[in-house]
Image: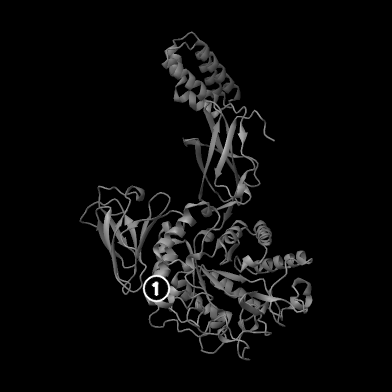
Amino acid sequence: MQSKTERIIIENVTPCIDSGRFPIRRTVGETVRVEADIFADGHDRLAAELLYRAQGRQEWRRRRMQAVGNDKWRSTFRVGDGGMYVYTLQAWIDRFRTWRDIVEKKAGAGQTLALEMLEGAALVAAAAERATEEEETLALHKKADFLRSSERMLDKMQLAASPELQRLMDAYPDKTGRIEYDPPLKVVQVPLRARFSAWYEMFPRSCAAIPGMHGTFQDCIDRLDDIADMGFDVLYLPPIHPIGKTERKGKNNTIPADASDPGSPWAIGSEKGGHCEIHPQLGTMADFIKLIEAARGREIEIAMDIAFQCSPDHPFVKDHPEWFRRRPDGSIQYAQNPPKKYEDIFSFDFESSHAEALCQTLLAVVYFWIEKGIRIFRVDNPHTKPLRFWEWLIDSVRRRHPEVIFLAEAFCRPKTMYRLAKSGFTQSYTYFTWRNRKPEIEDYLVKLTRTPLAEFFWPNFWPNTPDILPEYLQIGGRAAFVVRLALAATLSSNYGIYGPAFELCENQTQAPFSEAYLNSEKYEIRFWDLNRAGNIKSVVRRINRIRRENPALQQTRRLTFHSVDSEHIICFSKTDRNLDNVILVAVNLDPHHIHSAWVQLPHRELGLDPDQPFQMHELIGDARYLWHTDHNYLSLDPQVMPVQIFRIRKHLRSEHDFEYFM
């Protein structure tokens, strides 16, 4: 309990999530900027420090905080390769600076300072007793003696104001009465791929080179070079487990299924096994491990789908009927989201009296696949399971395997999405899929990057998924796919596409006003002509290369939207920390018509000299332009290329030689 006489207040500490209940997150090498309101009664000067350390270490590292006005204090630290970090703040009355203020004010008023010099001498002598270096101890004692001496008052005042004395007093401060912010706050360190990744989703059973054949893991291996060539570093596979037959869904989600229908991969479990087994037609466990290793050899990680649900044929249904909810007629309740019904899937009952055994079994499933080599999990519908279950599961995994990444596939209410992220999900699906107009894109990205959400909610932008073919892609043609690709890949440092449907610009739906794909791979095996006319593979390849070559695009936070006098053109910039890499993106949001506009750039914020020209290197077409002012003209034809991505190159040596840029 705090004393009633404590004088210093520390409040409004940022970053801080729910009063420290949850950690913020960073990758190794990233900076944490800590701010707080620190003040006290009266007119005494204050001092404050930021304390931080890797969790498990005893000794704090310290950084002085700087007052930045209106009782706001600030300091930073960089996250090293140490797992979880903790940080807190200390503040105390800076008695030496307070004394210097009094001396200065009294001197300015012509008042005597004899007693004040004795008070200062006592403060300096006390610091000498705290000093740990013999040379500095002697220096402080000497200065204390000088302040007590009969030397000229002007000389004493010069000593009191000297930077050297202030340096020594700062090195050995009097922290009597200091307070510390409690409890300490946490930073969880996540892998670099959590901050910057390009995901590619595909169904293994549709990878066969021969039409009508069921694909295998070997067929997936044969596809890896193409996926790597397009620039993706995460390959996400829908569930690879045995598929149930009871209530199996047929083509286009019809009931009943034909005998030849393969069923939905999310209807997990059959007589062949459950969540720890492989669908026999895909191959063996050895084949799957071979795929993991082959992908890793191409710098691609396999992301595995975790869908905690069962088909009626899953061994759990027979062996653990207590894990499922019963209806009044004794049947097990199938999954539903009225009016949608999923008769081929049973949901677990986390309110059962046997829920503890269920939770331990599901955690064991995750550990099983980690032992096989999986380091990334895409979790299906996590918002339909208890949120505290995920907090427990992810924390348990992270303690043993901090390198593991979890992506939350949760298109749900915002607060539920945010709580999943707080609970440990490294990345999150978002509403980007339905943000099409300029104002709604800008408003949404400002919320994700300029509010406390940025400290824990790391977005992964998906223009499409097997469940969602948005209206914009249905009606916009090839240009619409390029627009959504460019926005996803440059607005967010993490993005993904469901392919080959996306790069082949597949845009047919089951019915009008539907977002469901016609002949969806969820219910049938598809054969894809990977080089079909009209594909955008070359654009995908180019944009992913631009992402890899420009650090500004490898993070999501340092994003700024710019003024454009057209509602159809959106323009934004991203920068690295030191403004060495500055990227400007302009996108025509209308996939049907040419639009032109004047864009206004803030020179200072982009590190530009307003009096000097600068080069705009357009990275998709490799064209170069010379811009002179803060207002410049753009024209974007969606039938040619609806997107321009510029690298702004400064330090022009000669206005007539475009090659001399840093």
Name the amino acid, label 1: Ala
Residue denoted by label 1: 480
What is the x, y in percent for residue 151? 46, 9
Q: Residue at x 59, y 41 (%)?
A: 88
User: In this picture, is 178 found above or below 472?
Assistant: above
For label 1, count other residues whose C-alpha is less than 10 Å away and answer few (under 14), some (14-19) or many (20+).
many
What is the x, y in percent for residue 200? 50, 72
Asked which secondary structure carries label 1, the reply is: helix
The residue closer to the viewer here, 616 or 432, is: 432
Residue at the left extreme, as displayed: 656
User: In this picture, is 175 found above or below 294?
Assistant: above
The residue closer to the viewer here, 98 or 217, is: 98
User: In this picture, is 178 found above or below 407?
Assistant: above
What is the x, y in percent for residue 332? 74, 77
Residue 440 lies left or right of residue 402; in this view the side is left
Q: Where is residue 244, by image quadrant?
A: bottom right
Q: Where is residue 347, by image quadrant?
A: bottom right
Q: Residue at x 54, y 65 (%)?
A: 429
Residue 52 lies left or right of residue 532; in this view the side is right
